[in-house]
Image (cartoon, rainbow, N blue to C red):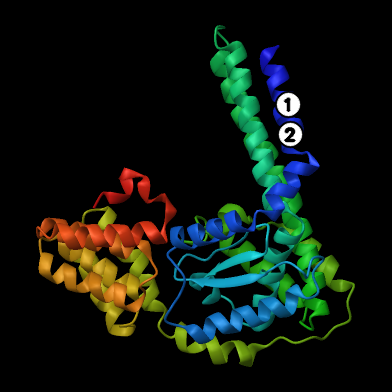
Amino acid sequence: MNFLFSFLLFFSSLFSPAHAAAASQDNEREREDYLFLQQEEGGADRIHPELQIYVQNVGERIARFSSRPQLPFEFTVLDNPVPNAWALPSGKIGINLGLLLELSSEAELAAVLGHEIAHATEGHTLQQIKRSAVLEFLQEGVHALVQEYWFSPLVDQSTTLSRQLILLKYSRTHELEADRLGIDTMEQAGYDPEAAVALQKDFLRLYKEKREGWLAGLFATHPPSEERVEANRLTSSRYSKGGAKGFSSYDRVVAPIREKKSAYEAVTKGRAALGKKKFCKALRYAEAGLAVEPKEPHLHQLKGEAQALLGKWEEALASLSLSISLNPDYFAYYLDRAAIFDKLGNEREAKKDRESAQRLHRDQNDPRRHDS
């Protein structure tokens, strides 16, 4: 009975207007979350400023036709080779470099950004957080009520499965709505809505092929389906044919970066090699990638980590210092270099680097962040 009363209080407060207003108006906290997620996802891309400006301009063009154009929309390209994109409730949107390299036109970019804008304007992210919190609270309460009985493990298992199934259905509903609204806004912004249909078909093909990188990235949170392809086709059919495709404008910005795609793939392959303790192989991946794109800071970081694990401390220090010079706004470079300074007995510089990392990433109080 006490649990039921507590749950009802929790549930009512979570969905009360006061709670919703506080959640939606807490811009400072949302800004912190945005910066936090950028750090978690590899940091903002700093070596392609023209790409950042381009994505911001396309995003703003679409956002003007959304249901909440007054939101402070912001679009950030992240230095992450895994194809992915995400949105926060206030209109803060991140898109990975890895996804941009897989798109072929400005209209396809508009489809992706329109979809993420819809997640933000319709409160999907906030609702998902609330739903997850309620289900977790409920599961813990059910466990507390039945833990004395033999069927407790069965209840635990069933509530966990139910939570996953409910969230899957919930996500599916939101994905369909975001697809529909995204197509509406991109069409109003002057883009060809057929690009959203073609893109979803490509995503479904990649999903069926279990393409490496996609399953852990975009498809983990945005699973494609035949249903979404057909729904996009139906939505698109409401509009007359035409609209901008933007192949040349997209190629003008992205093609020079796409030519160096092997360098970004080297980051992923090198990280996998490090995970398997194949340090020499990881170093070779880093050096091969740097031969293609010497300005990629993640490759210098990979090189430095491999060198450190091979006992080449001075060389590792030089590599990590290069990472920081190329992108001084990513916390992990400082943590890695702090570990090297520790090894070299330079406590003063190690402390300075940890403080820099802590300023950039609010989660640095977690001692696990200091593991090398």
Q: Is residue 303 left or right of residue 259?
A: left
Q: Residue 315's spot in the image, x, y percent?
A: 13, 71
Q: Quadrant of residue 157?
A: top right
**Local secondary structure at mark 1:** helix
Q: Give the CA distance from mark 2 to mark 1.
A: 6 Å
Q: Are marks 2 and 1 in contact (CB under 8 Å)?
A: yes
Seen from the viewer's position, the closer of residues 271 and 202 is 271
Q: Residue 124's spot in the image, x, y percent?
A: 72, 52
Q: Is residue 300 left or right of residue 243?
A: left
Kind of residue at disc 1: Leu
| The label number, if any, that marks residue 13 in the structure image | 2
Mark 2 is surrounded, within 10 Å at the Cα level, by few (under 14), some (14 to 19) or many (20 or more) other residues, namely few
Q: Residue 364's spot in the image, x, y percent?
A: 37, 51
- Using the image, determine if residue 94 lies above or below residue 176: below
Mark 1 is surrounded, within 10 Å at the Cα level, by few (under 14), some (14 to 19) or many (20 or more) other residues, namely few
Point 31% across, 44% down: residue: 367
Q: Which residue is mark 1?
A: 9
- Using the image, determine if residue 255 lies above or below residue 133: below
- Using the image, determine if residue 205 lies above or below residue 161: below
- Quadrant (top left/top right/bottom left/bottom right) for the N terminus: top right
Point 53% across, 83% down: residue: 51
Q: Residue 275's spot in the image, x, y percent?
A: 28, 54
Seen from the viewer's position, the closer of residues 5 and 347 is 347
Seen from the viewer's position, the closer of residues 108 and 91 is 91
Regarding residue 273, the answer to whether it shows in the image is no
Point 78% across, 57% down: residue: 177
